[in-house]
Image (spheres, helix red, strand yellow):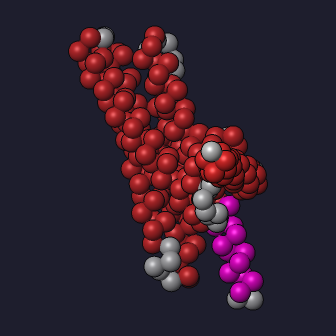
Amino acid sequence: MAQILFSSLIFSLTIFIGFFGTIESRSSARMYLQQQCRTAVYHDLCVQTLLPYTVKTVPGPQQLAKISLAVCLSKARQTKEYVDMVAKQFNKTKNYKDSQAVQECSRQINNGVNQITLSVKEFQQIGKDAEENFPLHEDNMQSWVSAALTDIDMCIDGILGDVIGGREKAIMKAKIMNVKQLASNSLAMLNRYTLRHRASHIVKNP
């Protein structure tokens, strides 16, 4: 009986230690990300987005920028699918003006998806290309994410007027605003990475 109680105690203690270790690691990861995300406009979202990828490992600025862009691209694609679905519904059941507004938004979101995709692909070339081409990659990535933000803003301006109302408008607004915030944070993380990269390169090559 004593052996069973002892075994149960050890088992419970092991679970507790593992649980405590998880809490501690998440707390450390959160503190790390709060520092890394300090330049992001949507700071809390930045931490929340990157936290699942930071508990078991400690990604540096380059990896954090990659993750941020990848998450943004995924959300942008999901949002594009939703806006396309709403556009089809409006084309069948709503008036022409509503349908046109949503279709235009869909085109702009699609442009944003394409821009972010180009930025992700450009990012993949870093490390494969010569260091002297880093400024070109940097400019391209920043330009494409900035262009995506412009497209998303145009979509928001188009659907937040008096044209579209009700539940569809509320859901689209929430989804598109989330993509905008993720894109803004991605640009901040990208800028942080490129700044640190250039600084370290200068140190290594005075």
- The image quarter containing residue 101 is top left
Q: Is residue 23 left or right of residue 133?
A: right
Instruction: Name above or below for residue 121 compared with residue 17.
Output: below
Rendering coords of residue 142 (x, y %): 56, 58
Residue at the far front: name it: 1
> Residue at coordinates 49% horizontally, 65% vertically from top-left?
123
Rendering coords of residue 144 (x, y %): 49, 54
User: Is residue 198 found inside the magenta-colored segment of the image?
Assistant: yes
User: Is residue 13 found inside the magenta-colored segment of the image?
Assistant: no
Q: Nearer the viewer, residue 203 or 74?
A: 74
Residue 32 showing in the rendered view: yes
- The image quarter containing residue 89 is top left
Work out which quarter of the rendered image holds the N terminus and state it. top right
> Residue at coordinates 57% horizontally, 54% vertically from top-left?
53
> Residue at coordinates 45% horizontally, 79% vertically from top-left?
128
Residues shaded magenta: 192-204
Dominant SS of magenta comes to helix
Work out which quarter of the rendered image holds the C terminus and state it. bottom right
Instruction: Name above or below for residue 199 compared with residue 178.
Output: below
> Residue at coordinates 54% horizontally, 35% vertically from top-left?
178
Rendering coords of residue 39 (x, y %): 73, 51
- The image quarter containing residue 164 is top left
Q: Nearer the viewer, residue 106 or 192?
A: 192
Rendering coords of residue 18 (x, y %): 65, 52
